[in-house]
Image: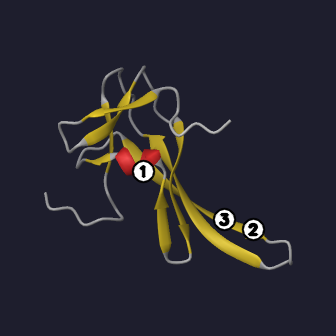
Amino acid sequence: MYKPLPESVTIKPSKVHGLGLFADQKIMHGTNLGMSHLKIGDRIFRTPLGGFINHSNTPNCIKAELRMTDEDLHGHQYYYKKWNLIVSNNVEKGDELTVRYTFYKIND
């Protein structure tokens, strides 16, 4: 069954900007929270993880890029990229999850 967010994460109002992702429990360094973005051709799609994660110059998460290859029913190979959100520092319950933006221009 598809779940848009891991059980350890919720969406709440953020002091950074609008809504953000917050830890519902302690999350340990190295935890893979799941896919945040998917790029097929020139289009980038955001999942709820990618849509609600806010930018920080001192983030507690990173985006890990995975390059993927697949084959369709006709034997044609196609390539795509996906990014998973990985916790880079232990996060306490109630902390906002943040990442350094690389897809968007930020005016700090």
Q: Tell me whether circle 1 and circle 2 mark residues in contact (CB < 8 Å).
A: no
Q: State the residue position of label 2.
A: 70
Which is more N-terminal, label 1 or label 3? 1
- Disc 3/disc 1 C-alpha distance (Å): 18 Å
Q: How far apart, in angstroms, are the residues tagged by discs 2 and 3?
A: 7 Å
> Where residue 54 sits: x, y (%)?
29, 46
Residue 14 place in picture, x, y as percent: 23, 36
Query: Which residue position holds label 1?
Result: 50
Tell me whether circle 2 and circle 3 mark residues in contact (CB < 8 Å): yes
Residue beneath disc 3 = 68
Q: Quadrant of the C terminus?
A: bottom left
Residue 34 relative to residue 104: left or right = right
Question: Which three-letter amino acid code belongs to the residue tagged 3?
Answer: Met
Per the image, label 2 sits on a secondary structure element best described as strand
Give, as a three-letter code, the residue at label 1: Gly
User: Which is closer to the viewer, label 3 or label 1?
Assistant: 1
Decide if residue 38 is on the left or right side of residue 25. Answer: right
Location of residue 27 in the rendering, given as x and y in whole percent from the top left corner: 45, 26
Residue drawn 68% across the image and 35% down it:
1
Marks 1/2: CA distance? 23 Å
What is the secondary structure assignment of the residue under circle 3?
Answer: strand
What residue is rendered at 35% in x and 22% in y? 92
- Disc 2 packing (10 Å; few <14; some 14–19; many ≥20): few
- Residue at 24% x, 47% y: name it: 56
**Residue nearer the viewer, 50 or 83:** 50
* Contact check, label 3 and label 1, Cβ < 8 Å: no
